[in-house]
Image (tube, grey):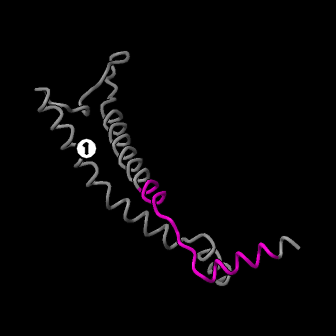
Amino acid sequence: MLKEFKEFVEKFNVIPIAIGLVLALAFAPMVDALVAVILSLVGAIFGAELSFDSLTFALNGTPIPYGALITAIVTFLMIAWVVFMIAKGLAKAGAQTTLNETPDQVLLGEIRDLLKSR
């Protein structure tokens, strides 16, 4: 059973996933604070306080708070935009790099081509 557990951990890269999850959870308060700062800046620019958390509507006399959902959506969109820009930048940087073949790789390619022509 211990051997199966070890294979599971190695096969599915559980340790790096766990580390990533812990870092993401530690990063969440910083993202929330950043969203609050950005919303405050936007509110200051337009001369109004932007706080979605207090938004509610009444349904049969019962207040339904929906402001927290709007804040969560704005947070998600901001994070998604940053991740998109990072991925786009990495893809662009990767596209500009060219790999030069080593002499061994050139020789192996020539051998492969000769074997194919036989």
Where 29 sits versus 11, above or below? above
Q: Is residue 91 magenta?
A: yes
Range of residues picked out in magenta:
90-114
Residue drawn where x is 26% and y is 55% of the image? 30
Above or below for 5 versus 62: below
Q: Position of residue 54 (x, y in %)?
A: 23, 30
Judging from the image, what secondary structure is the residue with disc 1 in?
Answer: helix
Residue 100 falls within the magenta-colored stretch: yes
Q: Position of residue 51 (x, y in %)?
A: 21, 33
Q: Is residue 1 left or right of residue 98?
A: right
**Residue extending furthest toward the top:** 60
- Up-down relation of residue 64 to residue 69 (above or below): above
The image quadrant of residue 115 is: bottom right
Q: Is residue 21 left or right of residue 40?
A: right
Amino acid found under the numbered disc labelled 1: Val
Write down the quadrant of residue 4 in the picture: bottom right
Instruction: Determine whether, in the image, residue 42 is placed left or right of residue 107.
Output: left
Q: Which image quadrant: the N terminus? A: bottom right
Relative to 71, residue 1 above or below: below
- Residue found 36% across the figure and 34% down from its top: 69
Judging depth in this view, the residue of 50 and 64 nearest the camera is 50
Quickly name the residue at label 1. Answer: 35
Q: Main secondary structure of the magenta part?
A: helix
Query: Can you say which quadrant of the picture contains the C terminus?
Result: bottom right
Residue at x 28% of width, y 51% of height: 31
* Residue 115 or residue 67, whichever sits in front: 115
Q: What residue is shown at x 42% (from left), y 58% (from top)?
A: 93
Identify which residue, 101 or 4, lies in the foreground: 101
What is the x, y in percent for residue 116?
Answer: 83, 71
